[in-house]
Amino acid sequence: MRWYYSGSAVKSAGELDRLVHDVILAPDFDPQDFLGFRAKKELERMDTPIDGAELAREETFSAEDGWRRGSVHISLPKAKIRHDSETAAPTFEVENIIYRPFLASIKAAYEDAVAERYHHIPFQLFANSPPSTAAPASPDPSDPTQRLYSEAYNADTLKELDEAIQLKAKDDREQDDPPDLEYAVAPIGLYSDSTHLTNFGTASLWPVYFWILGLSKYIRAMPSSFATHHLAYMPSLPDVIQRAYEQAYGVPPTAAVLRFCKKELFQQIWLLLLDDDFVHAYVHGFVVKCADGITRRLFPRILTYSADYPEKCLIACIKYLGRCPCPGCLITKDRIHLMGTKNDLSNRHRKKRTDTPWLRMLLERIRGWIFGRGIAPEGKRVEALLGASSTSPTQSAFSKRLGSFGFDIYRALVPDVMHEVELGVWKSTLTHLVRIVVSLGPSTVNTFNARFANIPTFGRDTIRRFGANVAGLKKLAARDFEDMLQCAIPVFENLLGSAHDRLVRHMLFQLAMVHALAKLRLHSEATLTVFECVIASLGRAMRVFASKVCPDYDTRELDKEVEARQRRQARKSSKSKASGRAQDVTPLAHSKGHADRARKDFNLNTYKFHSLGDYATTVRLVGSLDGPSTVTGELEHRRVKRFYARTNKNFQFGLQIARHERRERIVNDPRRQPSSQPPPPHTKGGKARRGRPRQHTSLRLDPQEPEDISSCSPTAHTEISEELRHPLEINGFVYDNEGDPAVEDFIPKLHRHVYARLVAGAGSPPDRNLAPTERELASLRIRNNRLYMHRRMLVNYTSYDMRREQDSISTRCHPDIMLLAEPGSIHPYMYARVLGMFHVSAYVAGRSNDEPTLLQVLWIRWYNFDATSPWGPESGRLPRVSFAPLDDDPFGFISPDQVLRGVHLIPAFAHGLSDSALPGYSIARLEDEEDEDFCYYYVGM
């Protein structure tokens, strides 16, 4: 503990536990091994290549795939200054580029331990459905087979690339290749984005990562798998370029020149990465012995490049928010609001951006004018040729290196749900809805905030607790906007008045549908057909919202927007003073009154809204959108930030981060781990833990108290503890809660349920029609007439994408469950709230086996499905339920095996509270609830 409270303050209690249990108590721990130990010496050993070569002065590692330090040169243009050629113009050297050789890094990725799980041969995935449910998207309605899309290796693009490589293997093999050498594609996914390394200060890093898309996204997305490979840390354009430019030309650079240089820097770094070795491997492949022991000739192919919109503009060499803002097509900004129409879909295909020899020739000519004739990079002559397509006069490194071999960088730029939906379309829509709410007055704002604050959480982190001031829209991440979208429909119901209520709910439902389908991890032809229809419907709903709802409100800047505008004005004012130029800057508005706020209109002509139309097509090409999602890259940023805390924070921190990245990968390589004894298996044997009976009969247990259900097997459907520490005397419980309607007939219902379970036998469902007589019930014996209470239940289930998932059901915070309804019911599911979790030891006297059987039972309160409330896209409502009234037998017992999974029920705030279903105080309500229930609840989908 003295070590824990000395030195660095970043050590946590969990890290202290790991030090004790994983190191000191490890079977192979020997204090003698630490004699002469020095951390600096051991780190240097890790940095030394395996072959024992000395570290080179200009390299971090001498190994083939190790980190290197490089530099690039940018040619500096000046209007009206002519040079003999671009190479004759003054240049600026950008140093401290930390990178790894691309080809060597790909080879290392295929030799990595996780490479044993790579899929080297793409395939198509199909599902067989009963003929009566054949998908309407099938080419032949009589054929029930449906194509499925999940990973890159079962989508179309990789299949087409593999067919081309297999044709080469058959007709044009590389010289000296044996006939049994396997040819395969090395599918690569790229990601780059700048990230701040600290909450305060300006330290930032611009990493480039890559993945091998032959690895399943479920493994690739886990940071602990180390499947994300760091390729380069790109520097930003340094401020000293302005001094260098002024020394070369006598005047400081214009904003247009700085934009040109920033794009040039990005492309020059990629030219450094796409070196001759990579280009040779792109054409002829490279031979490597993969981790599975098979030697292959692999051909690297870039399938996807994931990035946010500003980064996409750099990659595609187009103008940021230009006349044609999309990096994939030439649809103009004023036509973006037509997203989802037939004309829009036709234009996307007809006006695709394409990397052609003509475009490369045109850019060469224009660059010759810029440096040879002194034409400004954004001058009229350049705009006359490139302005119509919003192309910048920068040559793409991908086009220069790989364009002649058929690679088109425009096709590699894939949509991103996080930036385009959650932080894009939905964020802008929610912001304008909040502006409308603010325009209606403080009372409406308070109602809006109160509704969000009263939404219950769900799952471990599926729906988190909302703050008290959601309308402030401050300090929100993408996951917060995602949660708000899933809960928005009940919040906005009847909030804006009857005139616009249906239109807003319809738009929110369509937006939530698009988000859900975009996040779907497994698609079929049927879901993609629905996806295309929903996107078209969302386009119509958003246009109706913009034309019929928004004009009726005087929407002004929010507090957050006013503060942001004032900060921009302050920066502009300070820059003008520093440069000595007089600027007409509007004085800062210290008041936040209505008159001081600028009017804000709802804008649909944004790239992020436009990108929704490409989602279904992208799924068919590269698999579901969670595969190339930028979320994986953002998770990797956390590692980089953690490494930054271990650097000395000087200007070479990028080199130090590279060292830490390499070291962590080495120490976590499973092939380098020392063999050790496996930990003893956890068993639930032995005597059950007993405790003194509680002095009260409350069903609320201490949430901090440990409970032994950590050994839940994935093959088991449910798991409840069998501990005996919380006994509940049945008669005493009923007596203490006499008069509570929830406890009425508690004992007879419990006896009937337990008797039916015992008669049916283990593993068999009880007979629902069984009506035991009083004599039969009298033969039931419950040991000590006690129930044993438990705090939570784990429910394992198989999700739609064939993954094993788990829900935690708790009577304290996540008590709602769903069950299968009886055949022929109006709704496929039933819903209930778990009031208590028990186990009981019981037997039927007089039967051949009088040994008590341990049964686990759930005491529940039923919900009734509201068949009178329409739900779906047209009504803009979710399915609605309400607590069953007392005359409908609302309380009962079920077996845990009947539970499908947990469910998120959101209060229908617009319909208020009532105690008609359960008058007065009752033990059936949660601790934080009053003596009333919401009249209705919506089922979260």
Image (cartoon, rainbow, N blue to C red):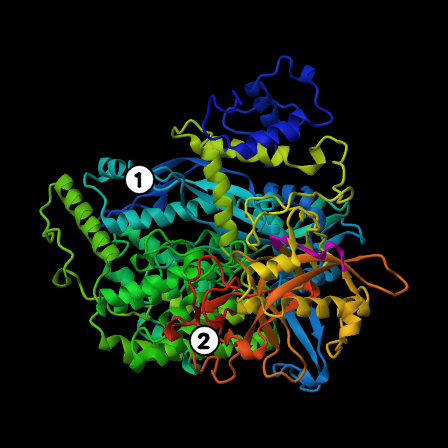
Left or right of 296: which side holds 330? left
Residue 112, relative to residue 879: is it above or below?
A: above
| Secondary element at tag 2 | loop
Residue pictured at 56% horizontal, 74% vertical: 528
Nearer to the camera, 866 or 39: 866
Q: CA distance from mark 1 to mark 2?
A: 83 Å
Closer to us: 580 or 785: 785
The residue drawn where x is 74% and y is 79% is 769
The kind of residue on which mark 2 rests is: Ser
Q: Indicate the position of residue 183 as horizontal and vertical percent values.
A: 72, 55
Above or below, 283 relative to 512: above
> Can you see residue 416?
no
Q: Is residue 783 magenta?
A: yes
| x then y, percent, for residue 831 | 58, 71
Q: Which residues are magenta?
A: 782-792
Where is mark 1, residue-wise? 90
